[in-house]
Image (spheres, helix red, strand yellow):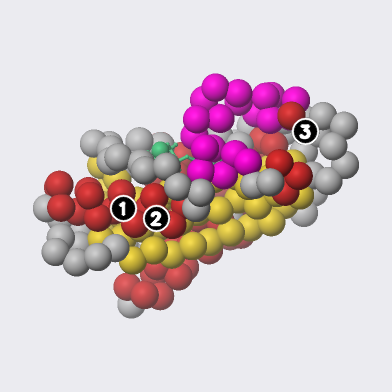
Amino acid sequence: RKIVFVTGNKGKYLEVKEIFSVKNIEVIQNTDGYPELQYDDLEPIAAYGAKWAAEQFKMPVMVDDSGLFIDTLNGFPGPYSAFVEKHLGNLGILKLMENEKNRKAAFKSVIGYCEPGIESTVFTGSVEGQIAHEERGNEGFGFDPIFEYKGRTFAEMGNEEKNLVSHRRRALDKFYEWLD
Ligand code: ITT
Ligand code: NA
């Protein structure tokens, strides 16, 4: 079985490829992109993106819209995560969190899957953790160096361990079950 994954993010693609290779699903990256509507939640963004891409490219596709939701910032950056990562970066987030005691955060991933002529289906996965006090670790991508899960950052854990517990893994498990 093959699945086309529309994403410009290499880190996401490599994780999905790895997680699905165990299930004998081949993941093919398509970097042509899709319009990302701005909503408060990730689900409608993923649903719309998958639908748009399925009709545009005339084939079944999946997308992954994800974000980091920080408790004390009322869920920010959430759906604005890509923009914030690009313009503030991890150091900008650490700055916002300076002197903040409540460091609770959740990573969320929403997989949208769609075939031409039908509506999208979405699968949500999330994992709770903490915003670290400094960047730690060299693996992974994006916010991984500042997202702590049980004391270590995702960037310290590395892909193999991250893929066992991550938001993306949890969303993909639901997607896989549905495909089956
Ligand atoms: P697409 O082409 O798939 O949209 P993107 O990077 O723009 O790629 P999003 O719109 O979903 O992705 O933005 C999510 C942001 O959160 C983006 O900056 C990612 O790098 C970051 N991110 C998502 N999943 C992550 C993970 O598992 N670890 C660290 N950062 C992550
Ligand atoms: Na994006």
State yes or no: residue 94 in magenta: yes
Q: Are marks 3 and 1 in contact (CB under 8 Å)?
A: no
Task: Report the predominant secondary structure element of the magenta stretch.
Answer: helix
Q: Quadrant of the N terminus?
A: bottom left
Question: Which label number is shown at residue 48?
Answer: 1
Question: Which label number is shown at residue 97?
Answer: 3
Q: Are marks 1 and 2 in contact (CB under 8 Å)?
A: yes
> Percent position (x, y) of residue 3?
26, 57
Q: Locate residue 144 relative to residue 135 in the image: left or right.
A: left
Mark 3 is on which residue type? Met
CA gap, disc 2 and disc 3? 28 Å
Residue in view at x 15 percent, y 47 percent: 56
Mark 2 is on which residue type? Pro
- Residue placed most toward the observer, 91 or 42: 42
CA gap, disc 3 and disc 1? 32 Å
CA gap, disc 1 and disc 2? 6 Å
> Percent position (x, y) of residue 30?
25, 42
Q: Earlier in the sequence, mark 3 or mark 1?
A: 1
> Disc 2 marks which residue?
44
